[in-house]
Amino acid sequence: MDSTTPVKILVVDDEASICDLMKINLELAGYVVDVAYSAEAALQMDLQQYSLMVFDIMMGEMSGLELVSAVRENKRTSEVPIIVCTALGEEKPLIEGFTRGADDYIKKPFSMREFVLRVQRLLKRANSNPLDVVRFENLELDVVSRTCRINGEEVTLTKKEFDLLHMFLTHRNKIFTRDEILRQIWEKNIYVVDRTIDVNINRLRKKLGEYESNLITKQGYGYGFKD
């Protein structure tokens, strides 16, 4: 995107006071912001003009989750970053939001500072070099910041765990032998026993949550990440 082109954001929330507050704070951060007070109203707008969208999950007849699906089903808006907001304490609506295609979430009540920072981070991510970010479904590795996120939540990895996961994600469905792993991940002239590799792999697997089963061990061959 050209740096001279204004970044336009759409905020959709049936609580007018919250919607307008988000608009004011985003405008103070330098963005051009439009609002809609229902999902139905949002769908009447030219959605392809926006660089990012923010949807409340709980709205009137059409929910924010249904709006996420509608945006993702449209070829012209299928890649636009989406943040969903919810006051619900349950995990299920958030998981469904990610399943439908949301990129991040924020729970109400939230500080406007946190909200603006999440918007800025997501926009930066969306405009980054594709080589800088490796994704598999809702698992994401940012090579520049050396961070890992699952469903928008950061997962703390050691340097070796990050390097292992990056190698596996950029070569999915390939089985790496221990020798290949040693050559690519560990420094030369460093003595590493097989047990060291096993420990790092097992530790990484436990941190992958819903993607734990994707990190596979092929007995007698090595390790890999399957789709």
Image (cartoon, rainbow, N blue to C red):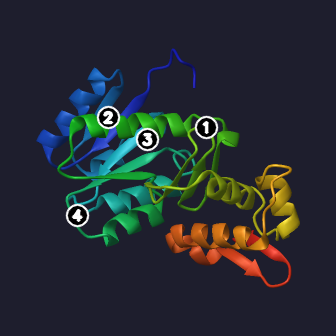
According to the image, label 3 marks what residue?
Answer: 47
Q: Residues within 10 Å of mark 1 (few under 14, many from 20)?
A: few
Looking at the rendered structure, the kind of residue marked 3 is Leu
90 shown above or below 127 = below
Tell me which amino acid carries mark 4. Glu
Front position among marks 1 and 3 = 1
Mark toward the start of the polypeptide (1 vs 2) = 2
Residue 61, which numbered label?
Answer: 4
The residues bearing labels 1 and 3 have C-alpha atoms spaced at a distance of 30 Å
**Labels 2 & 3 near each other (Cβ < 8 A):** no
Using the image, tell me which numbered label, if any, was put on residue 58: none
Q: On the picture, is 223 further left or further right than 68?
A: right
Q: State the CA–CA distance, disc 4 to disc 3.
A: 20 Å
Q: Where is residue 203 in the image (x, y as percent from the top left)?
A: 58, 69
Is residue 111 placed above or below 90 in the rendered structure? above
Cα distance in 3D space between marks 2 and 4: 28 Å
Closer to the camera, 109 or 209?
Answer: 209
Give SS at disc 3. helix
Mark 4–mark 1 Cα distance, whole angstroms, equals 42 Å
Q: Upstream in the sequence, badge 4 or badge 1?
A: 4
Tell me where residue 219 appears, x and y as whole percent.
80, 85
**Can the viewer see residue 181?**
yes
